[in-house]
Image (cartoon, helix red, strand yellow):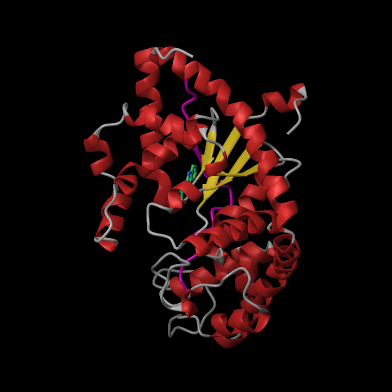
Amino acid sequence: MSNTPEQQKKKIILSGIQPTGIFTLGNYLGAIKNWVTLQEEYNCCYMIADLHAITVRQETAALRSGILDAAALVLACGVDPEKSLVFLQSGVHTHAELSWILSCYTQFGELSRMTQFKDKSARHADNVNAGLFTYPVLMAADILVYQADLVPVGADQKQHLELARNIAERFNAVHGNTFTVPEPYIPKAGARIMSLADPTKKMSKSDTNVNGFISILDDKDTIIRKFRRAVTDSDACVRYGEGKDGINNLLTIYSTVTGKTIAEAEAEFDGKGYGDFKTAVGEAVADHLAPVRDNFSRIRADKDALLAITSSGAEKALSITERTMRKVYKKVGFIR
Ligand code: TRP
């Protein structure tokens, strides 16, 4: 990011993704594809949320390669390090530093009400660690330390963003204006991609049924096979409508990857069966993802070049966030 006056006026966007497995078509269409679009209009900071990942036990070697995979995937999808900052969260120490301070401005009761904490502590009952509990405070620090204006998040992170806003407002009320209060960014084409095996559930990379999700690195045959198995209904009419979660999901996917409207897609498959439609969706998705796969193998193969990008991103991120930290330390009363 250079510092021409024009770029200084641009709003700041921050978002992050956890490095826990190859992204799904859902992550791609719901988040990363928007990251790519947003970088034309905003100053974007995109991070691999490795600190968040260890709130659930990770195997060391798997985490290490997962972090490299995630960084390579973000770039492979089209995030351009010349336009946006791309970095590893753990490489920018101000995130963890601000997180501690903000935790003293966050109430136990607020964190107890977070639905993701309740869900995850039920799912990982043997490891309900303090980090899992304070996870949203770290997320608030990620956002506030950049003075971010906008945060693109999915529905599952809305409550955390709301908390970040409350923490910012509370700190500002005590110490005077310090943090920008971030707004959620709702993408124009809000694609919420559902599981192919159970279209009432969000597509997830942790789904135990591999037919439920498309990995963005799946090969063409696998993608088509998974779409051909997608759960639909017995209506046999390619139309968007109530009670047709499976077809609605496939239409959303098809329209997002081809750029056609839902109505255009419906017209295209008028009178055709689900079999033809599913194959067409599979082919469109496979064609759309082919360049991402190629980019990924190239970028992931050169670890030094990849780390040069994330280190340079981290260096710039550090200098931006240290400005906020100086302000915060002063307001709190710390002596530097
Ligand atoms: N918690 C987010 C997720 O799991 C990832 C994340 C971490 C994030 N810090 C963030 C997203 C800051 C937006 C802003 O999806």
Q: Is residue 163 above or below residue 299?
A: above
**Taking 94 as reference, is 293 left or right?**
right
Q: Is residue 333 above or below residue 13?
A: above
**Taking 172 as reference, is 184 left or right?**
right
Rendering coords of residue 152 (x, y %): 53, 44
Q: In the image, which residues are magenta?
A: 176-195
Rendering coords of residue 308 (x, y %): 72, 46
Q: Nearer the viewer, residue 336 or 104?
A: 336
Q: How many marks?
A: 0
Q: Is residue 309 magenta?
A: no
Please give the name of the residue rendered at 39% of the width and 67% of the height, measured from the top-left corner: 201
State which quadrant residue 7 falls in: top right
Q: Nearer the viewer, residue 275 or 102?
A: 102
Rendering coords of residue 94 (x, y %): 51, 31
State which quadrant residue 281 falls in: bottom right
State which quadrant residue 68 falls in: bottom right
The answer to whether one can see residue 270 in this image is no
Q: For the N terminus, give its image quadrant.
A: top right
Q: Nearer the viewer, residue 74 or 329?
A: 329
Q: Is residue 10 above or below residue 91?
A: above
Please give the name of the residue rendered at 46% of the width and 80% of the height, measured from the top-left corner: 232
Rendering coords of residue 140 (x, y %): 43, 35
Main secondary structure of the magenta stretch: loop
- Farthest left residue in view: 109
Q: Is residue 146 above or below residue 328?
A: below
The answer to whether one can see residue 295 in this image is yes
Q: Is residue 192 magenta?
A: yes
